[in-house]
Image (spheres, helix red, strand yellow):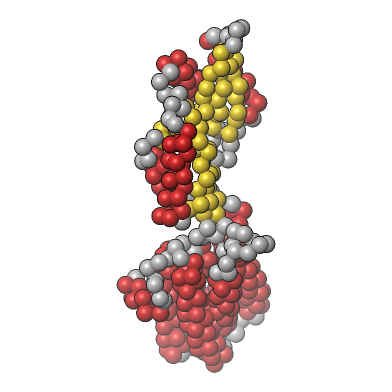
Amino acid sequence: MSKTRALVRFFIKNAEHTSNPVVRERYGRFASLVGIITNLFLFGVKLAAGLIFNSLAITADAINNLSDSSSSLVTLAGFKMSGKPADEKHPYGHERIEYIAGLIVSFLILSLGFELLQTAYGKILHPEPSVFSWLSIAVLAVSIAIKFWQMRFYRSIGRTIDSVTLLATAADSRNDVLATSAVLLSLLISRFTGLELDGFMGAAVAVFIMISGVKLIMETVSPLLGAGPDRELVSQISDRILSYPGVFGLHDLAIHNYGPTRCYATVHCEISAEMDPMRSHDLIDNIERDFHTDLGINLVIHMDPVRLNDPETQKLRTMAEDVLTQIAPGLSLHDFRVVHGISHSNLIFDVTVPYSLSESDDDLVFQVKSAIASINPKWRCVIQVDRGYVHT
């Protein structure tokens, strides 16, 4: 890892400013160029060895390296395009292009694996003897070493800039290490036992490629569909908001992004109803500004005034919370308030429901209303069910 950091500091200006989109693009370009150069080198050496020694497994591995080089080209284009500034048609920027580039790479890898599997199947049916050479063994050993270095290199940079594409590429390099090791093993087995496993090992390489493609598709589609936020980020946002004097609680936190460095969040903050409106507005403004300046998060806060010194409201809230606990674990309430009337009192609140709970909203509301009415018929509930928010 230290060698990777040394390379990064040498080739990337202001490498420590990873939240800067310009610096992030430099990281992506650097990693992509390294991938193009090293994979083209491996392709040339392995292709020559595969043709000279009549080894389908080595040739298949060479073509896999060529696909890796092509993937690096797509990644390079993706980082370049994702670095474009926001415009009128795309006010949230273009960073999601990186995910699309990763998706293209995934399908290329998957299709290549399928083609190689067909070729390997033919070799299994009609095997041809491979020409053993310690030179081919040396070529494969060097390839394994380079691919292992690639894995660590991509993983280091991918974690540094939080790049799904580069982390997936690191996993692909790890698979290449295993696949090339299988090829090397087949040659050694053939040399010392006479068993021709070239076609079978070629098929194994193809399967590794296809598995890698499927995994990459799953990993790159997830953020495009709207993957849930990292729990560490949720805790960081929640803890920081609650650290401000005057904020007594928060709920309805929603976090979404339009790329690795474009994070947006909305949240409801509970503020004392007795606080002067101008002071509470100033508090909210300061929190939003601090998040944008310090964390690069575009935060929008809805202010919920709560009565902190009303014993009756607090008592009724505790009663409602106890009812929710009895109905199902994980239920919570917020925005609780009481409106008294002549014949009855309305208990108005929102209920946050976890994804793990399969009951319908109507059934849930009916259970809560029935349970509270059984305690006191004069209490009538007005309930809003919340789903889809981050649970803090």
Q: Residue furthest top?
A: 343
Going by the image, does 22 lie left or right of 7?
A: right
Instruction: Point out residue 327 in the picture as x, y percentages from the top left corner.
Output: 53, 23
- To which quarter of the image does residue 67 belong? bottom right
The quarter in which the C terminus is drawn is top left
Q: Residue furthest left?
A: 2
User: Quick check: can you spot residue 266?
Assistant: yes
Instruction: Point out residue 81 in the picture as x, y percentages from the top left corner.
Output: 59, 71
Instruction: Point out residue 68 in the picture as x, y percentages from the top left corner.
Output: 55, 76
Q: Is residue 23 above or below residue 323?
A: below
Q: Residue at x 62, y 53 (%)?
A: 225
The quarter in which the N terminus is drawn is bottom left
Instruction: Point out residue 369 in the picture as x, y percentages from the top left corner.
Output: 59, 18
- To which quarter of the image does residue 75 belong? bottom right
Q: Residue at x 56, y 13 (%)?
A: 340
User: Quick check: can you spot residue 330?
Assistant: no
Q: Residue at x 58, y 36 (%)?
A: 387
Q: Is residue 246 above or below residue 107?
A: above
Residue 197 or 379: which is nearer the viewer? 379
Q: Residue furthest bottom?
A: 52
How many marks do you count on the picture? 0
Q: Is residue 222 above or below residue 277?
A: below
Q: Residue at x 43, y 36 (%)?
A: 279
Residue 41 or 121: which is nearer the viewer? 41
